[in-house]
Structures are given as structure tokens and as C-alpha cells.
Image (cartoon, rainbow, N blue to C red):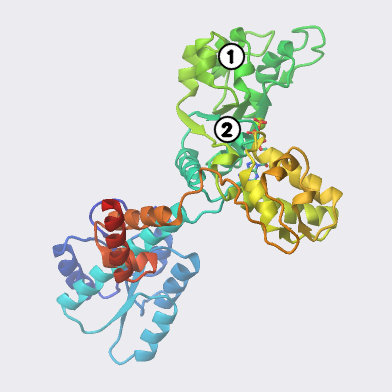
């Protein structure tokens, strides 16, 4: 686990007690929390538990070569800076350590000031690299769990899933049909500590009303006609894992009360039995209706709604995800072409424009079907406008047909989620500056731009804002 206290944590790995005491004195004075190790093995054992910002590592240890620790940190990609301490005159060793990913080295003997400056730089380096990591995680994701897509609205969804995964709190997923609600439930489960236990999916709309209670809670033999033996329900099967109640708004009111009791107490009884059973499940539910409208219409219990609506996740419709449409379409094309044994290598620019212009009422599922249809019915290698199945073919007249030999002129209307590049760029740059506490050179380094580029751009934005 990463150390979150305000004092930076250091591991000092030094077998000489006198030197260790001396270094600790210097470093504690500078406000570092120092954890001392006289041997190497305990360091390797401690690392999975507590990760320091900096490891000050003497390479000559009684029980192992300090280089092994460095190798381990490097191989595991652990985000901490290692400063190695080498004996006087061992330049080769220092070079080898740097090659293995050490951040810096100190050659004995060194004074307290040199020690503190090097450690300070190490802490700073570690903080910056973790900032870069967060930055990449937050802005560069074009795939997350079972989702494809890198649009801003989806980045928001990914961040909520990531934060909610570890908790047991109930997640309520809404979104139009085909937006990926089931993908969302699976991703949540797979990122959670419950991932080794089952994810049990119960589709409340697909099960006949008189069977649904038994599907959730199970039944005992003879509970109703047809109950020929005891049967476990979804609640028991999901013990330790996640219970995904899909299309939750289709559940009848009396069953909603039973569900509420189950959620509140974690206990239930099978149909036909009064024996209470207790389980530990995490609830995730989904609907493509507007759940609050269902509450107002009296079809969904208000108390159940509030009990379930702890962490809401709204999946945006595909038409609001900008270029994700193309990203997903290209991936499906490659996948289906492989499955069908066909050779497809992409879409023509005109076909791509149509995919972007269309409003996808059936969202990702519809896109999946459209691409499947194309792959099955055509030979490739390029998907052309003429191959797009209904209702996408209806969009074609919006294009002025080019005269023979003349390029296509009309510009199709582009989906609203696509914003001008300068706006996206401005937002990214301003966010980076804010994260670096206003330090423009630092933000520039992280963005891999020169500071003067940022200054120039900011001047241009300010000027155009005044126009
Ligand atoms: N972002 C995405 N990237 C790749 N595939 C996706 C994405 N979103 C959804 N899909 C795929 O689209 C199909 C529909 O997704 P899913 O079943 O999760 O949608 P849903 O919201 O539950 O739909 P419904 O409301 O109809 O139940 C699935 O095959 C799923 O794998
Ligand atoms: Mg679904």
C-alpha cells in the first residue's frame, strides 16, 4: 500500500549501525519518516505491505546483494525512487545500479546536506511520476474492463467504476438500451475484491412473475406445484460475490418489499420455508427506464429506490461519445471479419462520417449488429457507404452526390459530443497546470510540451476571449 501520510516515508537499508543512526538523524530532522532495515530480506517482505517514496539502499548487505532488491523493484514496476549507496571508487557498481533503474547514487563518505538533497529529489521524482501515472490513467484510457472508448463521458464512467469497485456499496446503473449496463456490472465485479466469487445475473424482465421470487431466494421441495426438490436461488449462489439485478424496474411491488428486507438485513428465506439464511452479497442493479419516474408513478418503491441508489452510474448514449463510435466499429469489424473468415481493413471516410452522424437509438448493441451484418453480407476489404444496412442507408441522401470526377462536397453534421480541438487542448493544459499547482514548466514536462508553447497558447486563448 502506498504511504499516504504527509511525512514522506523512507526505507533506510544499511547494515552498519553507526552509519544508520547518523543518516536517520539527518533525515528525521528534515521531516521524513524513516524505517530502518539492517538486512535485505526483510525489505522484500515489507514492500508489499508498505511502499516508501524513497529507498536508501546500501548495496553491500550481510544476507544478500542489494542489487537484488533493486532488480525486484524494477521488475515489479514499484513506484518508488531508489538511491543506492556505494563504496568509494566503485563507479562500475553505480553505473550498473543506474542501469537497473536506480534514481541516483551516493558514494561514501557523503555529508548530511548531500544526503538530504538527494533524498528530497527522490521524493519529488516519485511524486511526479505518480502524477504522470494518474494523468495517463485519467486521460488516456481507450479501453477499460469490457468497455471500448476514450471519450470524456466514458472517462467519467471509468473513474466511478474504479472508485466504487472496492466497496460493497450498491451501484445503480442506468442508460438507454444497449449502452453497456451489463458490461458495466461485469467490469465492476471483475475489479472488485469479490472477483474470485460468482457474479450472478438475474434478469427480472426475462423470468415469469410467479417464478421470480424462487429464482432470487430459492425454494424448498413442495413449496408450490412443480417444486420437486429444494433449490438454491441467486441470493445464495452469489454469496461472497455480486448479485446483478438487471431490469430491476420490472419487479413487482410485493417482491420489491421482500428484496428491500433482504438488502437491509442480508437475510432471506426460501419460498416455502421460514428458516432464515444469511449471505454476504454486493448488489448491482440496472434499468433502462428512468427509475425516479417509476417511483413517482407508484411502480417502484421509494424506500427501495433510495436503498439501491447509493452509487448511480449513468451510461451515456453512444451518440454522445464522439469518436468512440469509430473506435468501437473498427474493433468489431476486425473481430467479426476474423470470425467469419473475411478480409476487411476499415471504413471509407464517407462511411465513417455516416456512422458519426447517425444517432444510434440501439447504442452499442445496434452498432454491433450493423457491423456484423456488413461483414456477413459483403466481401470487403473496405466498408463503403453502399454496404450500410437500413436504417443507416436512409442517411445517404443528405450527401450531395459528387459529379463524376469531383470530390464529395457536402459536410455532414457532426455529433455534438465532438468539440473543437482547441477546446479539448485548452482543458487538458489548464487541468495539468492546476494539478501542478500553477507550475507551468512542470506541467509542460508532464505534457511533453515546451513551456513556451503553453505560454503562447494561453496568450492566444486570452486574446480570442476578449474579441
Ligand atoms: N463500450 C463498449 N465497448 C465494447 N462493447 C460494448 C460496449 N458497450 C456495450 N458493448 C457491447 O454491446 C452489447 C450490449 O451491451 P450490454 O448488454 O451491456 O448493454 P445493456 O445496456 O445491458 O443493454 P439492455 O438495456 O438492452 O439490456 C454487448 O454485446 C456488449 O458487449
Ligand atoms: Mg442489459
Which residue is disc 1 drawn over? 276
In the image, is 431 to the left or to the right of 189?
left
Give the mark nearest the N terminus, 1 or 2: 2
Q: Position of residue 387 (x, y in %)?
A: 79, 49
10 Å crowding of disc 1: few (<14), some (14-19), many (20+) = few
Q: Residue at x 46, y 38 (%)?
A: 164
Which disc, if any, is residue 44? none
Which quarter of the picture shows residue 9?
A: bottom left
Q: Residue at x 17, y 72 (%)?
A: 22
Element at label 1? loop
Which quarter of the picture shows residue 299?
A: top right
Q: Position of residue 8 (x, y in %)?
A: 26, 59
In the image, is 357 to the left or to the right of 424?
right
Which residue is disc 2 drawn over? 240
Q: Position of residue 308 (x, y in %)?
A: 50, 22
Against 184, residue 54 (above or below) is below
Instruction: Name the residue at the left extreme.
Output: 29
Q: CA distance from mark 1 to mark 2?
A: 17 Å
Amino acid at each position: 500500500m502506498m504511504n499516504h501520510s504527509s511525512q514522506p516515508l523512507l526505507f533506510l537499508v544499511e547494515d552498519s549501525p553507526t552509519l544508520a543512526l547518523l543518516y536517520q538523524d539527518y533525515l528525521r530532522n528534515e521531516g521524513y519518516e524513516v524505517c530502518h532495515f539492517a538486512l535485505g530480506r526483510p525489505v522484500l517482505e515489507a514492500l508489499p505491505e508498505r511502499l516508501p517514496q524513497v529507498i536508501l539502499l546500501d548495496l553491500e548487505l550481510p544476507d544478500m546483494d542489494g542489487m537484488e532488491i533493486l532488480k525486484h523493484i524494477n521488475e515489479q514496476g514499484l513506484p518508488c525512487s531508489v538511491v543506492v549507496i556505494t563504496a568509494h571508487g566503485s563507479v562500475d557498481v553505480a553505473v550498473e545500479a543506474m542501469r537497473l533503474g536506480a534514481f541516483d547514487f551516493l558514494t561514501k563518505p557523503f555529508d548530511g546536506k548531500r544526503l538530504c538533497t538527494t533524498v528530497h529529489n527522490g521524493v519529488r521524482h516519485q511524486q511526479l511520476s505518480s502524477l504522470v501515472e494518474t494523468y495517463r490513467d485519467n486521460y488516456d484510457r481507450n479501453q477499460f474492463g469490457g468497455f471500448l472508448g476514450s471519450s470524456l463521458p466514458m472517462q467519467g464512467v471509468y473513474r466511478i467504476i474504479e472508485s466504487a469497485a472496492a466497496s460493497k456499496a450498491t451501484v445503480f446503473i442506468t442508460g438507454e438500451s444497449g449502452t453497456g449496463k451489463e458490461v458495466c456490472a461485469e467490469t465492476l465485479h471483475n475489479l472488485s475484491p469479490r472477483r474470485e466469487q460468482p457474479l450472478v445475473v438475474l434478469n427480472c424482465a426475462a423470468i415469469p412473475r410467479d417464478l421470480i421470487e424462487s429464482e432470487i431466494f430459492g425454494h424448498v421441495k413442495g413449496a408450490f406445484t412443480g417444486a420437486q426438490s429444494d433449490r438454491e436461488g441467486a441470493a445464495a449462489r452469489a454469496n461472497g460475490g455480486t448479485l446483478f439485478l438487471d431490469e430491476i424496474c420490472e419487479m413487482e411491488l410485493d417482491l420489491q418489499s421482500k428484496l428491500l428486507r433482504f438488502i437491509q438485513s442480508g437475510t432471506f428465506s426460501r419460498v416455502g420455508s421460514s428458516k432464515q439464511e444469511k449471505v454476504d452479497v454486493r448488489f448491482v442493479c440496472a434499468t433502462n427506464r428512468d427509475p425516479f419516474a417509476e417511483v413517482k408513478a407508484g411502480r417502484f418503491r421509494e424506500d427501495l429506490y433510495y436503498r439501491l441508489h447509493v452509487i448511480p452510474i449513468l451510461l451515456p448514449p453512444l451518440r454522445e461519445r464522439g469518436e468512440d463510435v469509430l473506435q468501437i466499429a473498427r474493433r468489431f469489424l476486425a473481430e467479426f471479419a476474423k470470425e467469419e473468415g473475411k478480409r476487411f481493413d476499415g471504413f471509407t471516410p464517407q462511411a465513417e462520417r455516416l456512422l458519426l452522424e447517425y444517432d444510434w437509438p440501439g447504442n452499442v448493441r445496434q452498432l454491433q449488429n450493423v457491423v456484423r451484418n456488413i461483414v456477413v453480407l459483403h466481401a470487403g476489404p473496405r466498408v463503403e457507404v453502399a454496404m450500410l444496412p437500413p436504417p443507416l442507408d436512409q442517411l445517404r441522401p443528405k450527401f450531395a452526390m459528387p459529379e463524376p470526377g469531383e470530390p464529395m462536397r457536402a459536410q455532414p453534421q457532426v455529433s455534438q459530443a465532438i468539440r473543437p480541438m482547441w477546446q479539448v487542448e485548452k482543458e487538458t493544459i489548464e487541468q495539468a497546470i492546476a494539478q501542478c499547482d500553477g507550475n507551468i514548466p512542470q506541467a509542460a514536462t508532464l505534457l511533453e510540451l515546451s513551456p513556451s508553447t503553453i505560454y503562447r497558447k494561453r496568450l492566444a486563448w486570452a486574446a480570442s476571449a476578449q474579441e
